[in-house]
């Protein structure tokens, strides 16, 4: 199906949809390095611009709207969500395009913490907005480790189906699990040690791109970015905290002797080895931390083709009956 992607970043979500057989016809982000990365690896259909400056008429027709909207600024005091409220501008832009373009489906991704904002009132407000836009909506927290990603990363995945489409869209079933037994049809979680075992040290011989790393001193105080990493388990959540000046929080390598290189962190997010990141190390780390893991994106994207095919065939059959 034809996909439009908002807040695309480096393209982790888009790449998953492409691998599942969809066509991303238009994408948008305003982080210039991320857009350069997207163009280098995925395509020239991405527009580097503030989404609020882009008219809905400039966005092509599509079947699925996808994007992980930022949630900073949501509060009960902001429940009216006025159009001039800068804090929620990006969410309102996603909602605007959904209302104006009315795609058959949409997928929105966000951090797990959005569920508890304002004791749940903010999230209920968001779901209500999507329903009022004309969609049947369901959501679920998915752990990327359950889909073969070597990282424990929980995200809320919101699915929407247009009200006039008689189809039940379900979240993908996990393919991996923390503990397996003889009766399980699922694979064991992929550990970060296993995922990085064939990547040589940056100082050694290799032909890898982006295989450079932050020299920021290691700390082991239990805080985010300063925790010992267990090589036998999926990595902790990769984050995009920090800034372009070098203050990015980067996970320890599973050997706990240095921080991960850009290439290693990309592998932790299940990007392919030949995916090249533009910009300096800090920029690349941020792009990776902001991304949806490619394997998780693929699992979610894979629920659409078969289901839309059934819907399309039903519509064709109904039209044929009317003509007869």
Image (cartoon, grey):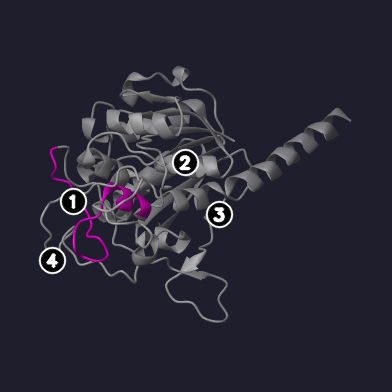
Q: Is residue 160 visible?
A: yes
What x and y, as percent, mark residue 247?
13, 45
Q: Return the disc, 2 or 3, that comes first in the chain's sequence.
A: 2
Q: Return the disc, 1 or 2, that comes first in the chain's sequence.
A: 2
SS at mark 3? loop
On residue 220, which mark appears? 4
Check disc 3 and report the residue beneath it: 170
Q: Return the disc, 4 or 3, that comes first in the chain's sequence.
A: 3
Q: Return the disc, 4 or 1, that comes first in the chain's sequence.
A: 4
Check disc 2 and report the residue beneath it: 15
Check disc 1 and report the residue beneath it: 249
- Determine contact: label 4, label 2, CB under 8 Å: no
Where residue 12 sits, quadrant-wise, is top left
SS at mark 1? loop
| Foreground of the two, 13 or 67 | 13
Q: Which quarter shows the C terminus?
A: top right
Residue at the (47%, 60%) spot, across then down: 147
Q: Which residues are magenta?
A: 245-267
Q: Return the disc, 1 or 3, that comes first in the chain's sequence.
A: 3
């Amino acid at each position: 199906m034809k996909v439009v992607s908002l807040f695309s970043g480096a393209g982790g979500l888009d790449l998953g949809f492409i691998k599942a057989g969809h066509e991303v016809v238009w994408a948008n982000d305003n982080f210039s390095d991320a857009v350069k990365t997207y163009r280098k690896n995925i395509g020239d259909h991405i527009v580097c611009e503030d989404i609020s400056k882009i008219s809905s008429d400039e966005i092509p027709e599509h079947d699925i709207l996808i994007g992980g909207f930022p949630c900073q600024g949501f509060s009960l005091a902001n429940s009216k969500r006025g159009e001039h409220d800068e804090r929620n501008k990006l969410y309102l832009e996603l909602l605007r395009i959904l209302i104006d373009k009315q795609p058959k489906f949409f997928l929105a991704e966000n951090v797990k913490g959005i569920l508890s904002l304002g004791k749940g009132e903010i999230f209920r407000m968001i779901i209500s907005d999507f329903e009022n836009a004309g969609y049947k909506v369901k959501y679920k927290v998915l752990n990327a480790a359950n889909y073969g990603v070597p990282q424990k990363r929980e995200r809320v995945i919101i699915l929407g189906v247009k009200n006039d489409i008689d189809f039940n869209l379900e979240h993908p079933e996990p393919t991996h699990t923390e503990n397996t037994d003889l009766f399980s049809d699922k694979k064991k979680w992929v550990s970060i040690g296993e995922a990085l075992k064939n990547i040589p040290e940056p100082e050694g011989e290799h032909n890898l791109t982006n295989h450079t790393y932050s020299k920021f001193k290691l700390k082991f105080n239990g805080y985010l970015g300063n925790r010992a990493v267990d090589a036998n388990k999926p990595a902790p959540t990769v984050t995009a905290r920090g800034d372009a000046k070098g203050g990015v929080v980067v996970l320890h390598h599973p050997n706990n002797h240095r921080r991960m290189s850009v290439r290693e962190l990309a592998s932790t997010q299940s990007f392919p080895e030949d995916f090249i990141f533009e910009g300096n190390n800090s920029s690349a780390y941020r792009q990776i931390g902001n991304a949806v893991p490619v394997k998780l994106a693929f699992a979610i994207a894979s629920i659409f083709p078969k289901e839309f095919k059934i819907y399309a065939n039903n519509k064709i059959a109904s039209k044929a009956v009317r003509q007869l």
